[in-house]
């Protein structure tokens, strides 16, 4: 089921004709996946976890019985439709009852991510909410966790809620809990760093990583066959695109630490690390990465519950945090 919309977004010349639809992840065909990959070059908030090679792999191997859907927003009126937004959603398990849709917190990523075109963010989010309202799913609201308060997505979500009369509730979000590192006795000897980029050699480097990760015991990737499979598939797909590499730290020839990188350049992301933490040795080319800012979670109603307000130039969630009841 798809819903057409014609929206006028501030700052744009003319109307933006959008069509939204809910799709099962396994139903996407290669042209649609390619449209998603193309969208990743135009997104408002770049994240490697919103990439189709990551999100679709998680949906295939780690859905764990959840009801998942992709809320896709297309722009019509061009030679071919252009994908402007993809929101991976977890839907209520019992479809006959009113419930809440939630932006899916992707396994092996730890955060909920969406791909939204930077030039059409407000129009995409409004089309997405309107489609959920008109669907037969009887959804009450949309839960959006893991928002950075000053991010472009947060600002656009606040603006859409205010301009359409939807109620938006915002709450602080507890930081993710990370298990303490397993103590490892460092080996004495010379330390070296090897960066593996070649797709063929990268497979062996990934297995080195998995062996180190297994020392964590419970919760390791090898302890969950589905997670280990998803991990291997993601690294293989990104390596095929030359968008992955593995850093291996050796002491006297033995691999004692490893880091998996996805994407390149300014979007380079350390996906996972395992093994010995070596003080003073950075597994990145640049300076140490600053700690992640605190995040918030938002709940926006699908139905408009109040009078719509004229859109403001900027509506931030930080202001809503201070004003919430």
Image: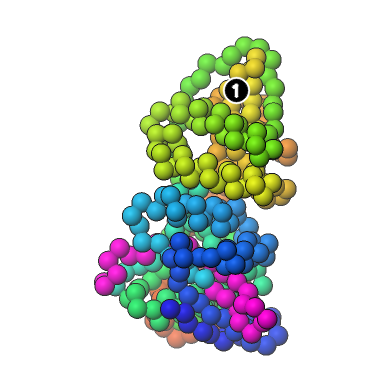
Quick one: label 1, few (<14), some, or many (20+) residues within 10 Å? Answer: many
Image coordinates of residue 262 in percent, x first then y, are 62, 45
x then y, percent, for residue 135: 39, 78
Question: From where the camera sits, is residue 239 visible?
Answer: yes
**Residue 291 image offset from top left, x and y in percent:** 59, 43
Picture layout, residue 319 above or below residue 213: below
What residue do we see at 45% from left, 72% from top? 22
User: Quick one: quadrant of the N terminus?
Assistant: bottom left
Is residue 44 visible to us here? no
Q: Is residue 84 magenta?
A: yes
Image-quadrant location for residue 67: bottom left
The quarter holding residue 248 reads: top right
Question: Seen in the image, is 280 located left or right of residue 103?
Answer: right
Judge whether 10 appears above or below 34 on screen: below
Q: Is residue 51 left or right of residue 303?
A: right
Which residue is depicted at the point 65% across and 17% down? 253
Picture quarter with the C terminus = bottom left
Which of 249 and 207 lies nearest the eye of the viewer? 207
Give the residue at the far top of this rendering: 188
Residue carrying label 1 = 255
Extent of the magenta region: 73-97
Membership of 42 in magenta stretch: no
Residue in the picture at 57% in, 87% down: 6
Colour scheme? rainbow
For label 1, the SS is strand
Q: Is residue 274 above or below residue 271?
A: above
Relative to 190, is 245 above or below?
below
Give the x, y percent position of residue 270.
61, 41
Residue under the image location 73 percent in, 48 percent down: 265
Viewer-nearest residue: 49 or 142: 49
């Amino acid at each position: 089921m798809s819903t057409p919309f014609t929206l006028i977004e501030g700052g744009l010349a003319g109307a933006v004709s959008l069509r939204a639809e809910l799709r099962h992840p396994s139903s996407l065909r290669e042209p649609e996946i390619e449209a998603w990959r193309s969208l990743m070059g135009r997104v408002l908030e770049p994240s490697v976890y919103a990439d189709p090679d990551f999100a679709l792999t998680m949906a295939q191997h780690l859905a764990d019985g959840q009801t998942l859907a992709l809320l896709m927003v297309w722009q019509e009126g061009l030679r071919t439709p252009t994908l402007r937004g993809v929101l991976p959603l977890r839907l209520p398990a019992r479809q006959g009852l009113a419930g809440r849709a939630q932006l899916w917190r992707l396994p092996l990523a730890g955060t909920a991510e969406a791909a939204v075109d930077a030039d059409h963010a407000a129009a995409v989010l409004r089309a997405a909410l309107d489609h959920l309202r008109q669907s037969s799913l009887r959804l009450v609201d949309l839960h959006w966790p893991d928002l950075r308060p000053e991010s472009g997505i947060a600002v656009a979500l606040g603006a859409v809620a205010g301009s359409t009369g939807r109620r938006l509730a915002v709450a602080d979000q507890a930081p993710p809990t990370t298990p303490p590192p397993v103590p490892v006795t460092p080996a004495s000897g010379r330390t070296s760093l090897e960066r593996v980029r070649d797709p063929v050699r990268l497979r062996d480097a990934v297995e080195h990583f998995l062996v180190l990760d297994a020392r964590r015991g419970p919760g390791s990737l090898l302890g969950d066959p589905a997670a280990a499979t998803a991990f291997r598939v993601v690294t293989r797909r990104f390596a095929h695109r030359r968008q992955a590499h593995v850093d291996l730290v050796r002491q006297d020839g033995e691999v004692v630490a490893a880091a998996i990188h996805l994407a390149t350049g300014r979007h380079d992301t350390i996906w996972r690390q395992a093994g010995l933490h070596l003080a003073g040795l950075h597994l990145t080319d640049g300076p140490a990465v600053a700690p992640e800012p605190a995040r918030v979670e938002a709940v926006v109603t699908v139905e408009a519950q109040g009078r719509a307000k004229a859109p403001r130039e900027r509506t931030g969630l930080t202001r809503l945090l201070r004003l919430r009841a």
